Image (spheres, rainbow, N blue to C red):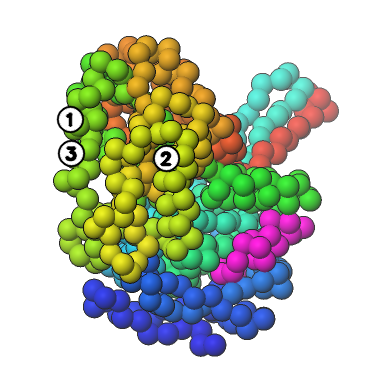
């Protein structure tokens, strides 16, 4: 197959799209010759075919990354020079922002303006942020006695970082993982999601343009069961960073045990949002809606469980239904007013729809949506769906659905709200709405989640650590905390006794 093709998106943007595997700074075909089709979720049309790598291709990419890690072209670069390369990559991404946003909108289905402002905007910021950190990673001296000098060094991991990213924020998730890994001096083999490989491949071309040495970043498209599995178990991969489902995260964790790889897992979520009766109701409704319906619910931290104090129950439900009805614009990802995009593929759409039947059969009340009213015949759309219940044990409350699907429950007391919020295998995010700042901090402290928003939801920042409790993952991404996942600490002991 060709290493690249010319594409023209529905918004008129044209570019040269790489279609091969990116190994050693070159785009190459998969050894098997197999390909993946990438589909436009809006109209189910085929956008392109790209190479589908397998175990043999992963082996070649890992060898290239291992060689690059040891090569003076990379290992002898100063930290400042690594930072300069990352900053240049951010500049090149900014120059090509329109193309990157077009790719992710077309490939993923999300509205173009959202892809441009949020996803690509954060991608640029992340590369610049970690560019600034590159020469500020250092250890400390440790006082022991006059006869001894002890100090620590923060060094790269012993070689290759395998990185597996999801389909919901394709280019941004690549930046989340590549940025800190390169700032710390590691090399990378990245596997994009098979549903959305295009922006990672385009980013690879920009990485080469920025001047990174061959083999420092490699991109192997492929299915999880082949490329992903091999990357996770590979004996010459020293670190796995994964974002995706909890089930897949568990499988990766088992595979990584083969050589005790360092792991970072950002997995599933079923985030609660607590609305107290002293909140600003209008703001609570707007943030609650955005927290679950934004990106059609395809966000790991989506606040898919709403707990509303019984004293404002009716007011909140009426306002939430009204706001949902008035703020649902279904359409093409390239239409200016679209804010309710499709799900990523047919399987995702069918999974979400199956939970509507589950909710009804388990006694929950369907109060909005769930009928596919106003949904186009073509495209993987799901109507915004709202259930109410008082039963915290049913499937639609306990299982991650990953769609525009929310369950609202009443509570009487703060203690009851916290108890229900924590009654979950997940602990990724949570939100609290109250004007009582003491209550806000108290509830945030008592909720079992890695991130808690007070009087907002989902407004994350690349400088703030991101990760979860319980089965929502291990480790943290973003901010200074991510650097800990890509360095190891060496302690040096110097005997000064001979010289005293």
> Under tag 1, what secondary structure?
helix
- Label 2: which residue? 360
- Total of numbered circles in the picture? 3
Residue at left offset 59%, top offset 60%: 188
Q: Give percent across and percent down for residue 194.
A: 53, 66
Does the magenta-highlighted stretch encompass residue 90? no
49 or 272: nearer the viewer: 272
Q: Is residue 39 above or below residue 264?
A: below
Q: Give percent across and percent down for residue 462.
A: 39, 43
> How far apart are labels 2 and 3 at the CA level?
22 Å
> How far apart are labels 3 and 1 at the CA level?
11 Å
Is label 2 in contact with label 3 (beta carbons under 8 Å)?
no
- Label 1: which residue? 282
Residue 405, by quadrant, is top left
- Label 3: which residue? 322
Residue at left offset 52%, top offset 63%: 192
> Label 2: how many residues lie within 10 Å, few (<14), some (14-19) or many (20+)?
few
Q: Which residues are magenta?
A: 214-235
Q: Is residue 466 left or right of residue 116?
A: right
Is label 1 in contact with label 2 (beta carbons under 8 Å)?
no
Does the magenta-highlighted stretch encompass residue 226? yes
Q: Give percent across and percent down for residue 108.
A: 39, 63
Residue at left offset 71%, top offset 28%: 149
> Under tag 2, what secondary structure?
helix
> Label 1: how many residues lie within 10 Å, few (<14), some (14-19) or many (20+)?
few
> How far apart are labels 1 and 2 at the CA level?
29 Å
The quadrant of the rendering that contains the C terminus is: top right
Q: Give percent across and percent down for residue 456.
A: 29, 32
Observer-side mark, 3 or 1, equals: 3
Instruction: State whether residue 195 appears in this view.
Output: yes
């Amino acid at each position: 197959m060709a290493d690249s093709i010319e594409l023209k998106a529905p918004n008129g943007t044209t570019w040269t799209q790489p279609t091969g595997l990116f190994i050693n700074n070159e785009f190459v075909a998969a050894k098997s010759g197999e390909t993946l089709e990438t589909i436009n979720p809006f109209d189910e049309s085929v956008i392109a075919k790209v190479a589908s790598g397998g175990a043999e291709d992963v082996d070649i990419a890992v060898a290239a990354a291992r060689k690059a890690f040891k090569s003076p072209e990379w290992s002898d670069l100063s930290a400042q020079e690594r930072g300069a390369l990352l900053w240049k990559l951010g500049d090149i991404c900014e120059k090509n922002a329109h193309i990157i946003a077009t790719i992710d909108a077309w490939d993923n289905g999300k509205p173009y303006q959202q892809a441009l402002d949020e996803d690509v905007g954060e991608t640029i910021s992340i590369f610049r942020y970690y560019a600034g950190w590159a020469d500020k990673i250092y250890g400390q001296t440790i006082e022991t006695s006059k006869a001894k000098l002890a100090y620590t060094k923060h060094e790269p991991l012993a070689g290759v970082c395998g990185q597996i990213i999801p389909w919901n924020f394709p280019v941004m998730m690549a930046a989340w993982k590549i940025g800190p890994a390169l700032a710390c001096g590691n090399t990378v083999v990245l596997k994009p999601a098979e549903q959305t490989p295009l922006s990672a491949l385009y980013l690879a071309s920009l990485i080469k343009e920025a001047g990174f040495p061959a083999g420092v970043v490699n991109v192997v498209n492929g299915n999880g069961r082949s490329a992903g599995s091999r990357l996770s178990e590979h004996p010459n991969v020293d670190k796995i960073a994964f974002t995706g489902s909890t089930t897949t995260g568990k499988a990766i964790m088992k595979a990584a045990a083969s050589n005790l790889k360092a792991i970072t897992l950002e997995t599933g979520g079923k985030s609660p949002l607590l609305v107290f009766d002293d909140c600003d109701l209008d703001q609570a409704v707007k943030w609650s809606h955005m927290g679950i319906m934004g990106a059609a619910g395809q966000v790991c931290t989506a606040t898919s469980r709403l707990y509303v104090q019984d004293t404002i129950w009716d007011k909140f439900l009426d306002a939430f239904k009204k706001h949902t009805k008035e703020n649902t614009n279904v359409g093409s990802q390239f239409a200016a007013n679209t804010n309710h995009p499709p799900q990523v593929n047919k399987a995702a759409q069918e999974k979400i729809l199956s939970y509507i039947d589950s909710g009804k059969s388990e006694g929950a009340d369907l109060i909005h949506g769930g009928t596919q009213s106003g949904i186009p015949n073509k495209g993987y759309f799901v109507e915004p769906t709202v259930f109410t219940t008082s039963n915290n044990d049913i499937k639609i409350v306990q299982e991650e659905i990953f769609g525009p699907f929310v369950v609202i429950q009443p509570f009487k007391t703060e203690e009851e709200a916290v108890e229900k919020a924590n009654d979950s295998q997940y602990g990724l995010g949570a939100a609290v709405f109250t004007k009582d700042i003491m209550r806000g901090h108290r509830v945030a402290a008592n909720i079992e989640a890695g991130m808690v928003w007070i009087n907002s939801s989902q407004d994350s920042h690349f400088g703030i650590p991101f990760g979860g409790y319980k089965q929502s993952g291990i480790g943290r991404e973003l901010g200074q905390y991510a650097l800990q996942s890509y360095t190891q600490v060496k302690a040096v002991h110097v005997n000064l006794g001979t010289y005293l």
